[in-house]
Amino acid sequence: MKKLTRMMVAASLTVPLMCGIASAYELVMPTLDYRTGPYAPNGIPFANGYGDYLNMLNERDGGINGARISLVPCETGYNTKLGVECYENTKNEGQSGALVYQPLSTGITYQLIPKASVDEIPIFSMGYGRTSAANGKIFPWVFNFPATYWSQATVFVQYIGEREGGMENLKGKKIALVYHNSAYGKEPIRTLEKAAEKYGFEFLQLPVDHPGQEQKSTWLQIRQNRPDWVLMWGWGVMNQVAIKEAASIRFPMDHFIGVWWSGSENDVLPAGEAANGYLSGAFHQPGGNFPVHDDIRKHVYDKGMGLGDRDRIGEVLYNRGLVAAMWASEAIRKAMEIHGTNEVRGKHVRDGFEALEVDENRLKELGLANFTIPVKITCENHEGPGQVALQQWDAKAKQWKLVTGFYEPLRDITGPLIAEDSAQYAAENNVSERSCN
Amino acid sequence: MIYRETGQFKANYQDDQALFPIAQDRYVIFGILIVTFAVVPALLNEYWLNAILLPFLIYSLAALGLNILTGYCGQLSLGTGAFMAVGAFSVYKMMVAIPELGFIPLVLLSGLVTAAVGTLFGLPSLRIKGFYLAVATLAAQFFLIWMFNKVGWFFNYSASGMINAPPMTIFGVIVTGPEANPVAKYYLVATIVAVFALAAKNIARGRIGRNWMAIRDMDIAAELIGVRPLVAKLSAFAVSSFYVGMAGALYFAVWLGSAEPTEAFDINQSFLVLFMIIIGGLGSVLGSFLGAAFLVIMPILLKNIMVDGLGTDTSLAKHFEFIIVGAMIIAFLIVEPHGLARLWRIAKEKLRLWPFPY
């Protein structure tokens, strides 16, 4: 016991010393990933895509504009408390300090939002987190482009309206929401309530408790209430269980729409053929045949540095991690351009995010032509385009495919809600609105 | 030698009944207090204060609370997470509604609210015991968390059900919210924990504490010698919940800053605190601190050693952490089934007789 204590003391003393050594200026990008626990099936491919893209930049281009990226992984297990510990542990890492955080957890994002402005590190909660952070006037340090949960919910309503033959046909229809009973899953409720009021459909709420392995009663309720459509805000094992349960009560899969966190290979494969036709939101293409994937194979996997399996490159969540890394690295590039130096810090990267513009041409240069929607961020709008498409699972080919174009969200519903929620945050936390002119 | 008591004479009853009758114990306590308040904040950086010591102190307070109920009074409770949630939500509602009262009074008030709720859920303890009582407190856990998740009034109707701690100051220093100074937060929590740990030690050795222990050891015998079970059991629930409620308030307002009921206060939280007192030592103030240290600090240290020191892959380190902490729990409980505090007590007995321990 004594020996162990001595070892621990020695190790804890040497840890800070070892972190202090740094030669050239490195861009520190912590990744709060989760490769353990009930959310690991979804956390792993995302973390792999994120890390592989940044490693590819290091290997192919020597980093961003010649400054190498230093990836600092920290395991959160999708647990808020561990996420906070990871944040405190990594925020002052290296010379640059952490440049941007992407927690991939709505709970951790909520923790970090107030801290970000004090520590001057931007938070990029890509398509998750607090929806009202879209209001850049109240949340200068948080970015949630390319679209929020509320935009997505209104897009689903539009899609359902279209499939039913017009928005007027929504009247009297029944739409159920199966959601993860947490801050994340509750995000779309208010939007859907407003939409239900406006279009006259009936809205059913069915919470599923963490981790979501037990859903028999939820789907029994669906069998009894017979909703016309089921929406799902799920994550981790909850997704595959829900899809299997839906299959077992023979719910029509093409009337079952998941949020974009509930639409990856891991979620549908366990249900086999029965998952055919399941829909989910999306803001980028699936598949591993873009030029950027070839670069990753060549510069990362051929050198034996790949984080995951070679044949899983191009899965939906892998690509999502990749696009997150792409936008973050572009924001750093922009920050270097604005401030005329490679030695950027968190506050500079925030400026880079706020001036970020990745259009079709830039996507093509990056080897990602038509991969995702063009994004342009401004001081007041941190949500960017807000457009969402739908993808569908083809169980025979084992492939996801985008089946719709990108829809505009119903801004008449989301706009006032965002204004109201961000105003409430501002009032509770004594934040004053900044001017954007 | 170290613990030689030769020459320490007690001339009156007051000295004999002092909180720490042995002079060496007093010096150690003073030493710990000096280190806690003078040395630690000067030596350690923000990461240590925010991410390691703050949760350690707050969990110690929660463990202390549960130890009063389970360790001293023998009433098994699995509702600690829910009672922490009561503390957190009541301090949140009061911070938004009546911030002018000041933060420390609000923490104490939230402790009182929790004490009331805890007493209410302690009523079944008058009829049922042991594992059956554990199941009744489990009902508190599920009901309260469900309520905080369901009823919009508790989280001021925020869209996600999350609560955020607004900034508050003590003597002009910000102690909650993102801009809070880590040293100020540490001092605040350390003061509250120190004061209430001494209070717990005091209560435990007095009449009330002895009543609790009598009930714990044999309730029928205790009743025969004149201990009223109703008063003893309910007071244990009230005092325990008061501590746990304050811990919940600090946990939410000072450490986390925002919380959602389902994750921050779930059943795992109850188990974690229960394991703390089992490993640390039932019926011991010191044990609450040792148990909290074991389950809060140890995993973080292990992680830092493996990931930063040895360069282990993060997920592999996490799996190893589970294995090592689990193995250490088993090892410690085999060496000393009565917890870490008992190890210290044995060491102390031996030190008193040293160099001829028997």
Image (cartoon, rainbow, N blue to C red):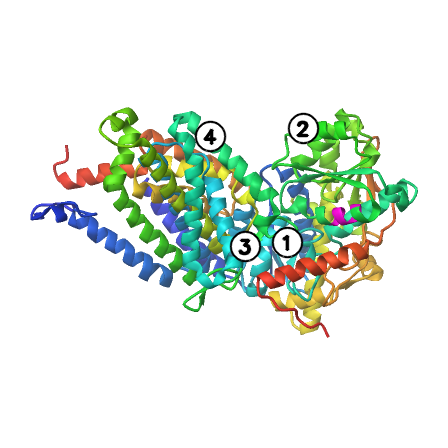
* In the image, residue B142 lies in the stretch drawn in magenta: no
Q: Position of residue A238 (x, y in %)?
A: 67, 35
The magenta stretch is A191-196
| Marked residue nearer the N-terminal end (3 or 1) | 3
Q: Amino acid at mark 3?
A: Tyr
Chain for numbered disc 3: A
SS type, badge 3: helix
Chain for numbered disc 4: B
Q: Which mark is residue A217?
A: 2
Q: Is residue A288 visible?
A: no
Vertical relation: A260 (above or below) B214: below
Q: Which residue is mark 3?
A: A87
Q: Quadrant of the N terminus of chain A?
A: top left
Vertical relation: B130 (above or below) A238: above
Vertical relation: B130 (above or below) A55: above
SS type, badge 2: helix
Q: Are marks 3 and 4 in contact (CB under 8 Å)?
A: no
Foreground tag (3 vs 4): 4
On the rendered structure, is A187 left or right of B230?
Answer: right
Chain for numbered disc 1: A
* In the image, residue A192 lies in the stretch drawn in magenta: yes
Q: Which mark is residue B136?
A: 4
User: Crowding near pointer 1: few (<14 within 10 Å), some, many (20+)?
Assistant: many
Foreground tag (2 vs 4): 4
User: Crowding near pointer 4: few (<14 within 10 Å), some, many (20+)?
Assistant: many
Q: Nearer the viewer, residue A223 or B286?
A: A223
SS type, badge 1: loop
Chain for numbered disc 2: A
Q: Nearer the viewer, residue B85 or A95?
A: B85
Residue at (77%, 52%) from the top-left corner? A151
Residue at (44%, 61%) from the top-left corner? B101
